[in-house]
Image (tube, rainbow, N blue to C red):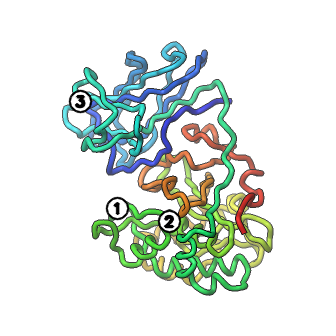
Amino acid sequence: MSKLFYTEAGHGQPNMSEELTTFRRARKVLDLPATSKSATVYALMRAYPDSKVPLRFSVNGREIATLPAMPMPWYRWYQFTVEAKHLRRGENVFELWCDATAMNAWSIGLESGYEAPRSFISDNSGAEWRNHHMGYLNTFRAEYILRVRLEDGQDAPPPPFKWEDPGTARMESLRRVIPEAAKGKGSSLEKAQAIMGWLSSNIEHANTVITMQNAPWDPETVFDWGSKQRGHNGMRPLVHCVHFSATFVSCAQAVGIPARCAVFTNQQPDGWFGHFTAEFWSAEQKKWAMVDPQGNACFMRNDSELLSIAEVQQVRPELAKYTKFGEGIESQKKNPRLKGFIFDRYPVGTSFKHRSTWYRSDLLTNPIYNPPAHGSTAYCETGLVWDEKEKDLFGMFPHFGDEAYFSGAPVGFPG
């Protein structure tokens, strides 16, 4: 048993983070209960690839650790073990800095949008602190993505799933642009395939190799930006598996099919070969079926039995035998950035080792809960619910579900 303490949702953006130097120091304050056991501190950070400067870390005014720079070009999780004697009941102060004088060694991820954050920045080596004008350009209030897991206590049960309200103007607008084949009298699978084929045939995949201008999780905007390859401020948008699947989830619900986002990684959250897919509830087979909207793919046994995520994971080394691509895959094959994934990793299920589910499917009704840059950093969003068997690997997340949570029928879905 253990419990995670945190004050943010992991909605960070890698191009809006906090740089650390010997002058510029970051502080996070967390309220903790009394404990007699050690704690694990998780911080989402990036070390510059050519940096030789170690990261320095203190708890309640006592420096307790340094970390060598690791040559990885993305934000990933770093861990510290803190003995119980360094912690106290109530406010605990965690500070991070390094001995660089320029912003060229370490940075920490942050989430903006807080009125009174419990994160602080100093420009003068800790002599003064402020919780405003934060970020490397000193422009907003934010919480640093730093969390603490205590061995005492227990995480809350995973949240119930949230669905779209079908009566909103946004959902009505979306229904007008969805293909007619998805709105007819066909089966759940036929409607899902119509939506996937429409998306994968018209949206061009663009990842972090060529742009960092994220598209929002807004289906009509994703379709427009992704088909034109032009978005916010006239820049090329980042539209990848995340956006295909999030758009599918909204579209499926618009035509009356329960759907939710499904997120995978091949190793811990720092893994580079993850994938973002979706699930829809098959009314005919009474189960959640996994689909991949980007590749216009569903997963089936004997050309009829849809596979759940758990079943896909069981056949993972031979996934090619169970993968049924639709016409949209031909458009995706033309993209040189996807060839390695489609022909090498996909057939053997490399990306589907560890599973999680986004408990919120109300992506249009409540867009403030949609992460702005998923897939651009190590996974960090607290809206992900991981398999409870993975808690040792994913201790920086607060929610874990059992098989009943993942496989149960959609409760409360309108319609």
Q: Residues within 10 Å of mark 2 (few under 14, many from 20)?
A: many
Mark 3: which secondary structure? Answer: loop
Residue depicted at 66% across the width and 61% down the height: 316
Task: Select label 2 or label 3 by which is in front.
Answer: 3
Give the side of residue 8 with respect to residue 168, left or right.
left
Amino acid bearing label 2: Cys
Evaluate if marks 1 and 3 touch, with contact meaning CB atoms under 8 Å apart.
Answer: no
Would you identify the image quadrant in which residue 277 lies?
Answer: bottom right
Give the side of residue 62 with respect to residue 293, left or right.
left
Residue depicted at 41% across the width and 74% down the height: 226
On residue 213, which mark appears?
1
Quadrant of the image for the N terminus?
Answer: top right
**C-alpha gap between disc 2 and disc 3:** 39 Å
367 or 294: which is nearer to us?
367
The residue to which callout 3 is attached is: 123
Amino acid bearing label 1: Gln
In this orientation, does residue 34 appear?
A: yes
Q: Position of residue 5 (x, y in %)?
A: 55, 32
Residue depicted at 40% across the width and 39% down the height: 115
**C-alpha gap between disc 1 and disc 3:** 29 Å
Mark 2: which secondary structure? Answer: helix
The residue to which callout 2 is attached is: 241
